[in-house]
Image (cartoon, rainbow, N blue to C red):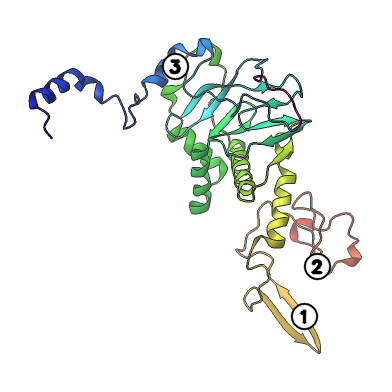
Amino acid sequence: MDTPLDFVDGCWKAFGSLIWRYDENGKTKGTDAEAFRKHGLDNYFSSRMLFPPSHYCSTPGCTNTRLLRDEDGPSKVVFYTLSDGACATFATHLSCSDCKARYYPNYVVRDGIRIYYDKIPDAIQVAGHQYVERAVLNLFINLMLISWTSATNGAQVYNTSLSRPENLPGHPDWIETSFKLRPEHVWDGFIVLTLLEDHQARSATLRVPHTGEQRDRFTSAMEERNTRIQLCGQPEWGHYCAKCIRVWDDNGVTRKIHVIVIDGITIGHPCCGVLHCPIRSATIDIVFVPTIPLSETRFVPSKAAR
């Protein structure tokens, strides 16, 4: 380089105390977020504001070409991130004055149905006022796959190691807000993200009820996916081998037996004692669902039912 050394020395004297405050993209390291925590919360500003992806209505047939309206103002939410911990921030939803559709950061609500956007967001809503960063959810998924980490332990790992309590706001409006990540947030985030990825891979749109209990909101979507995977989602579904299925001749009658549980443990997956019964058992203690007469069964009840 032809840059004079005295010029380099002058630049270092002028900017040496500032350069370490910036990352490789030229952004200040944490200083912006700190300024927002100190001065932005009073004015409903933060460094991680959440908005719908569009300011115009996309409802088919709606003729409204005006900007969507913010009728209620931003709501306080907690955003669980990987780099900044649990952040105090705000989420905004917008409304169409003509068709009454309501647009949220993750989805639009029409006629009581949540319709998720095609692009998977970086902030996944897991409860009314809680969002989890996609990178955090991928961390939980990998912990479950690699080390069998439970949702409870995953939440504890985050609260202990990643929540960064030093970044929690001291603002009086946030004193009673809980910044603890709960196990149900981990599970709901896992479910929402995997369903969104499944629908995106099929160029489909995830639709779930907007009303009702959060624990029941995604049940139908999960059942639909499980049924599809069972019928046509695995290339090995129609295979025939001598490892998982045993076929033998019993005095001229061909009989078959197959394993029920591959890994030797079943937790939270109750099923009826009747082979291929399509009716779901309510609890693990119910061996025979009420609509199946005991006279039609060929299985001995488990110890839990005795």
Circle 1 packing at 10 Å, graded few (<14), some (14-19), many (20+), is: few
Alpha carbon separation for disc pair 3 and 1: 70 Å
Residue 63 shown in magenta? yes
Ranked by sequence position, the earlier of labels 1 and 2 is 1
Foreground mark, 2 or 3, reads 3
The residue under label 3 is which amino acid type?
Phe
Coordinates of residue 250 in the picture (x, y in percent): 78, 86
Q: Amino acid type of disc 1?
A: Arg
| Pointer 1 residue | 255
Q: Quadrant of the N terminus?
A: top left
Q: Of label 2 and label 3, which has the lower sequence position?
A: 3
Query: How much space separates mark 1 and mark 2, taking CA atoms?
Result: 16 Å
- Asked whether the residues under the numbered discs 3 and 1 touch, taking CB atoms below 8 Å apart as contact, a structural biologist would say no
| Residue for badge 2 | 299
Segment tinted magenta in the rendering: 61-68
Q: Of the residues tagged 1 and 2, which is closer to the observer?
A: 1
- Percent x, y for residue 6? 8, 23
Kindly state the secondary structure of the residue where label 2 is placed: loop
Q: CA distance from mark 2 to mark 3?
A: 64 Å
Instruction: Give the total number of marks visible in the rendering.
Output: 3
**x, y (%) of residue 262?**
62, 65
Residue 175 visible, this angle:
no
Q: Main secondary structure of the magenta part?
A: loop
Residue 36 tag number: 3
| Res 246 quadrant in image | bottom right
Identified at 51% across, 44% down, the residue is 138
What amino acid is labelled 2 in the image? Phe
Q: Is residue 284 above or below residue 12?
A: below
